Image (cartoon, rainbow, N blue to C red):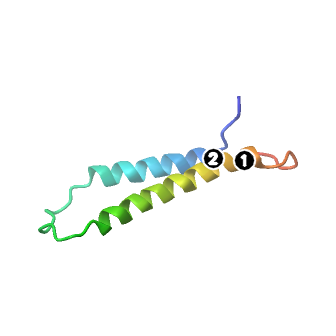
Amino acid sequence: MAVISRVSLLLVMAIVVVLATIANAQLAPAPAPTSDGTSVDQGIAYVLMLVALALTYLIHPLDASSAYVLL
């Protein structure tokens, strides 16, 4: 069983806390919907980039050569 490094675990925990905070934020009422959907697309793109970044940090130690020592 692979051991998850502390940095990876802390990164995932930080992302979860940020996403939970965003989900529970009490926002002011939104203005009348005049958007063409680009802001929704941009929000989805940001979330996908964060997921890709987290996966990169979690998978990268598995690809590292045996010369490196994982913490």
Q: Secondary structure at mark 2?
A: helix
Task: Kindly identify the amino acid type of the residue bearing the numbered disc 2.
Answer: Leu
Along the horizontal axis of the image, is 58 left or right of 52?
right
Which residue is at the far top?
A: 1
Along the horizontal axis of the image, is 59 left or right of 63?
left
Q: Please provide percent x and percent y for residue 4.
A: 66, 39
The tag on residue 58 is: 2
> Which residue does the numbered mark 1 point to in the structure image?
61
Residue at screen point 13% across, 62% down: 29
Which residue is at the far front?
A: 36
Task: Kindly identify the amino acid type of the residue bearing the numbered disc 1.
Answer: Pro
Q: Is residue 71 visible?
A: no
**Which one is nearer the viewer's eye here, 39 or 56?**
39
Q: Please provide percent x and percent y for residue 35.
A: 22, 70
Residue at screen point 36% across, 48% down: 20
Packing grade of label 2 (10 A; few <14, some 14-19, many >=20) is some
Packing grade of label 1 (10 A; few <14, some 14-19, many >=20) is some
**Which one is nearer the viewer's eye here, 4 or 36?**
36
Residue at screen point 88% across, 49% down: 67
Q: Quadrant of the C terminus?
A: top right
